[in-house]
Image (cartoon, rainbow, N blue to C red):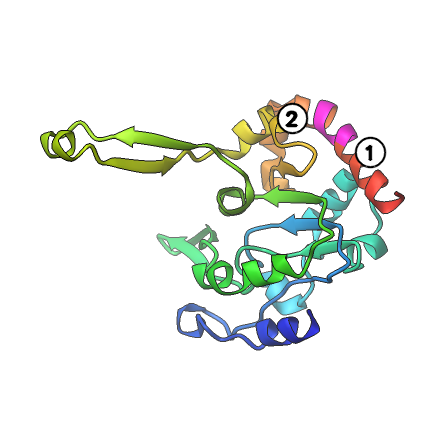
Amino acid sequence: MDELLIKIRACTLCQAYLPLAPKPILQASSQARILIAGQAPGVKTHHKGIPFDDASGERLRTWLDVTREQFYDPTIFAIVPMGFCFPGSIEKNGKKQGDKPPRPECAATWHQQLLALMPNIELIVILGQYAIDYHLPREPIDLISTTAQASKTHSKSIKVKSITVTQATVQWQQYWPKYIVLPHPSPRNNLWLKRNPEFERDMLPKLKMRIASLLHP
């Protein structure tokens, strides 16, 4: 694991596409029992070099009911976003409209290697659509094409049904206890939390109990 982390932190695969110098940010250990799977570092995280060291992180730690010391202990929590570097901002009419999607090179190059070296992971906390699409198990759907050519060849295409954050939280028990999807803890999601009170009422108590059981087996 130490050798792999050295390679990842020296990675420059997508340097040409980044607005700032590559600075892969993650936390991992072969002993980790909980994986935080997010999107990609924001610009503030890029400069600090510490994931979730902001208001979003404070809320996330409250949701998990853990201390900063526990959260930043790599033998407890692995923090492996879909993209390790700040991907840049989306701008429209001269105004920032959020961050760009995580660069795909990270997941394609490093994620399977990292996950293979973390055999003790018992819970994956998923934040964001890209992490959902990568981590959350979904049933493939067989689609038989109705074209005349397909009728002759009886060919099939396979489509994997995507799922939104809201859908995943509504049916959270389907993925429990291995996976749980959370809305991003950003203050920008206060309206979502207000519209979905069952998240804090029903899901968070179960999540806190699960985290506690993993911290104190």
Query: What's the residue type where badge 2 is placed?
Result: Gln
Residue bearing the label numbered 2 = 173
Q: In which quarter of the image is the N terminus?
A: bottom right
Residue 173: horizontal and vertical position, in percent?
65, 26
Q: Is residue 186 visible?
A: no
Seen from this angle, which residue lies furthest front? 153
Q: Is residue 6 visible?
A: yes
- Residue 101 spot, x, y in % from top left: 45, 53
Mark 1 nearby-residue class (10 Å; few <14, some 14–19, many ≥20): few
Mark 1 and mark 2: Cα distance apart in space: 14 Å
- Magenta-colored span: 202-206
| Label 2 CA crowd tier, 10 Å (few <14, some 14–19, many 20+) | few
Residue under the image location 46 percent in, 58 percent down: 89
Where's the C terminus, which quadrant?
top right
Classify mark 1: helix, strand or loop: helix
Instruction: Kindly identify the amino acid type of the residue bearing the numbered disc 1.
Output: Met
Reply above or below: 65 against 201.
below
Dot label at residue 209: 1
Along the line of sight, the residue nearer the viewer: 13 or 47: 13
The one nearer the camera, 68 or 150, is 150
Q: Is residue 204 magenta?
A: yes
Q: Position of residue 121 (x, y in %)?
A: 71, 49
- Left or right: residue 150 versus residue 1 is left
Give above or below for 60 relative to 208.
below
Q: How many labels does the image show?
A: 2
x 65%, y 63%: residue: 26
Q: Going from the N terminus, do you reach mark 1 or mark 2 first?
A: 2
Q: In which quarter of the image is residue 210?
A: top right
Identity of the residue drawn at 82% across and 33% down? 209
**Placement of 150 over or under 30, stated as above or below:** above
